[in-house]
Image (spheres, rainbow, N blue to C red):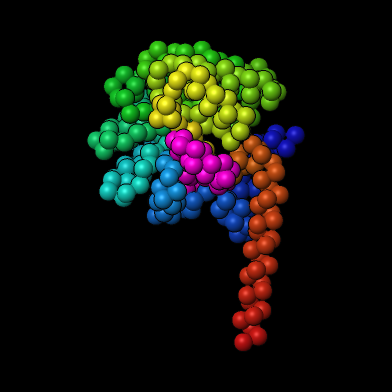
């Protein structure tokens, strides 16, 4: 029930404006979002590097409504890729197709995506295409395939909760594609997605086996220890080294598990979102694990009390 509620709230403009005006929104989002500037995101990436993990920067934004916005988003990624060079951090980048203009036309979206992928290739870096709602899955995959025909430094996310994902994974493997397997974080109907968690988990495990048996490098993206342990077991059974694949996790979620995987010698990449468009992202994180809301409320209340105490101490002086 809570998942459905939070996903329904993701596009709610009234709540978004309320959270922004109240100031609480940023405090809530700060657990999952590195900040609003590239500088803050790079600082988070540098901290991850010190901890032995890699990073993946995402400039938040989606569903742009005109060509200028799409071009500006692409330019932001070009600047990001230039800034990464020489920064001493191991970080890639990730974007959403709708941020690059998918809803304005496939050709426009492809051109903006190609600008980013080409610049990344010049810097010997890698780009990930996020996956959005099921209504854009086919178009996103077709744009990816077109990019992959000319560039080998681009990967794509595939969502395990969709019925179609097994066929998509097999088709992507056939062209040498690089896949980030995740469960999925959008509100999908039972006509296109598994409605029950156990079925999503079972499909995630099946797709993990397909990917880790493909001979290509892929990413397993989950915070579910059962899914991660299954991947480790499959890799061991296939005789794969820890360098043959990576785990991807989200900024601010299961940092204890991230650290454990690093200590155990696994490759871990943390997805670091930043920017002003944090509201839809926050709602999807709460939908994935509604208990995060209680955690965030406690953190905000604790911080407010601490500031109040400091104010009282300052007044007493």
Image height check: is 236 above or below 112?
A: above
Give me the residue at 50% from left, 23% from top. Answer: 236
Which part of the image, by quadrant, shows the N terminus? top right
Image height check: is 299 above or below 216?
A: below
Q: Can residue 35 be seen in this view?
A: yes
Q: Is residue 61 visible?
A: no
Outermost bottom residue: 317
The magenta segment is 251-279
Is residue 34 found left or right of 151 in the rendered image? Answer: right
Viewer-side residue, 183 vs 28: 183
Q: Is residue 266 magenta?
A: yes
**Residue 150's x, y, as percent?**
28, 22
Viewer-side residue, 153 vs 105: 153
Which part of the image, by quadrant, shows the C terminus? bottom right
Is residue 155 found left or right of 303 in the rendered image? Answer: left
Viewer-side residue, 213 vs 281: 213
**Residue 27's x, y, as percent?**
59, 56
Give me the residue at 31% from left, 36% from top. Answer: 125
Q: Is residue 68 magenta?
A: no
Residue 120: quadrant of the picture: top left
């Amino acid at each position: 029930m809570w998942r459905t509620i939070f996903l329904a709230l993701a596009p709610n403009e009234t709540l978004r404006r309320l959270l922004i005006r109240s100031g609480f929104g940023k405090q809530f989002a700060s657990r999952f979002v590195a900040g609003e500037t590239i500088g803050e995101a790079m600082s988070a990436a540098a901290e991850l590097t010190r901890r032995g993990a890699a990073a993946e920067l995402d400039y938040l934004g989606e569903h742009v409504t005109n060509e200028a916005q799409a071009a500006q988003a692409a330019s932001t990624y070009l600047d990001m890729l230039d800034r990464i060079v020489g920064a001493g951090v191991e970080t890639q980048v990730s974007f959403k197709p709708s941020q690059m203009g998918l809803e304005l036309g496939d050709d426009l979206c492809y051109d903006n995506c190609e600008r980013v992928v080409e610049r990344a290739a010049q810097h010997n870096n890698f780009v990930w295409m996020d996956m959005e709602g099921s209504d854009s899955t086919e178009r996103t995959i077709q744009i990816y395939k077109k990019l992959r025909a000319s560039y080998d430094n681009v990967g794509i996310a595939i969502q395990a909760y969709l019925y179609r994902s097994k066929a998509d994974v097999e088709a992507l493997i056939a062209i040498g594609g690089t896949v980030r397997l995740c469960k999925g974080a959008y509100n999908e109907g039972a006509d296109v997605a598994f409605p029950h968690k156990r079925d999503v988990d079972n499909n995630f495990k099946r797709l993990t086996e397909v990917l880790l048996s493909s001979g290509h490098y892929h990413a397993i993206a989950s915070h579910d220890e059962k899914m991660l342990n299954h991947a480790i077991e499959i890799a061991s059974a296939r005789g794969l080294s820890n360098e043959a694949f990576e785990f991807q996790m989200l900024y601010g979620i299961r940092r204890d598990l991230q650290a454990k995987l690093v200590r155990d010698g696994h490759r871990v990449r943390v997805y670091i979102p930043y920017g002003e468009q944090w509201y839809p992202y926050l709602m999807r994180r709460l939908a994935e694990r509604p208990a995060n809301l209680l955690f965030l409320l406690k953190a905000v209340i604790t911080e407010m009390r601490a500031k109040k105490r400091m104010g009282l101490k300052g007044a007493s002086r």
